[in-house]
Image (cartoon, grey):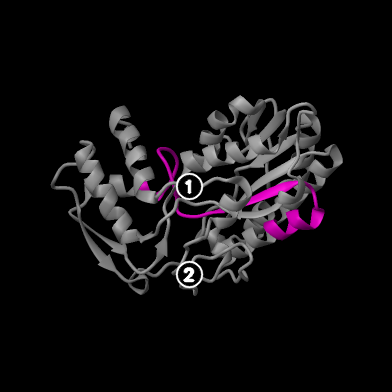
Amino acid sequence: MRILLIGREGQLGWELRRTLACLGEVIAIDRTSRPWFIDLSDPDSIRAAVRGLRPQLIVNAAAYTGVDVAEKEEVLATMINGVAPGILAETAAELGAGLIHYSTDYVFSGEASQPYDEEHETAPLGVYGRTKQQGEVAIEQVGIPHLILRTAWVYGTRGHNFLLTMLRLMGERESLSIVSDQQGAPSWSREIAECTAFMIAQCQNREADCFEVDNRSGIYHLTNSGRTNWYEFAQAIRKQAITQGLLEESAAKLKPILGSEYPTPAQRPSWSVLSNQKLKAEFGLQMPDWQQSLQLCMDELGSAKIPR
């Protein structure tokens, strides 16, 4: 099966390049790759890449992820997050291909007190969440075989994420104030990619070399299990980083604060806990607890001594 992976250098795309390799021919591209490239802000670029490469499955791991900047760049964010997924779906339909697309907890208002399931009403608080919701709807309206995977609080050993930012700041400062009243489940990009590969394997028709979802098309929540807040997540990072020798005992001390004490241009949902029950029921998959996954990720950082 030929798989077109979009967003090859992102923290999730980098992991997907490795986990999907055993499922077929993976062609990983982005805006700068050659000879084939794709610019999600340019509809012609999207159509040209998909029609030229003729994949059986498209995996879109690219997005406009600047949550705060999106408040000022709504047109660009809408094109990349809201319009481009629909164009990908339409072009995939021409080829009889399937589509996997990643979405976010930001499609919800954060006013719940129990984990959100896939049927819960969406009510995004800002431009980023609203454009990601538009992308979900655009794919669903085309009606091709698809999986929309909502995830949250993604981190990894590459790219820009909370883990790497905390490690850097803890080594530079004497103290850090971290928001403690926003709940969620930190999710390791490696395990999101691995779970995606298991889902694809279950939908792969090896005789026809094609992607067949049957009646399982739709939205799935895909995060690590358990829940915490940003302050507790930072505490766990600090503790494990000291154990791994990535930080000294004198690393920045952490202070919990309320989200209202750290205002940002875009409002964040205070509750980002997603239920993974549908994933387990339909695919028999269950993501590990976030603390277990953080330990594995930190083990990798410690053994590699990756500079930041």
Residue 287 - label? 1
The residue furthest right is: 94
Whether 151 is among the magenta residues is yes
Report, in whole angstroms, how far the alpha carbon at label 2 lies from the one at label 1.
Answer: 18 Å
- Highlighted magenta segment, given as a residue range: 135-164
Closest to the observer, 199 or 149: 199
Residue at the image point whose x is 29% and y is 58% from the top: 232
Residue type at numbered disc 2? Gln
Total marks placed: 2
Q: Earlier in the sequence, mark 2 or mark 1?
A: 2
Left or right placement of residue 67 versus residue 94 in this view: left
Residue at the image point whose x is 83% and y is 39% from the top: 96
Closest to the observer, 176 or 59: 59
Residue 64 visible in image: no
Q: Give coordinates of residue 151: x percent, y percent.
A: 53, 53
- Quadrant hosting residue 295: top left
Q: Is residue 228 above or below residue 39?
A: below
Left or right placement of residue 255 versus residue 104 in this view: left
Left or right placement of residue 24 versus residue 116 in this view: right
The 10 Å Cα crowd at callout 2, few under 14, some 14 to 19, many 20 or more, is few
Please tell me whether mark 2 sits on a helix, a strand or a loop: loop
Q: Give coordinates of residue 34: x percent, y percent.
A: 66, 26
Residue type at numbered disc 1? Met
Whether 68 is among the magenta residues is no
Q: Is residue 265 above or below residue 160?
A: below
Residue 217 visible in image: yes
Q: Give coordinates of residue 194: x percent, y percent.
A: 53, 37
Residue named by callout 2:
114
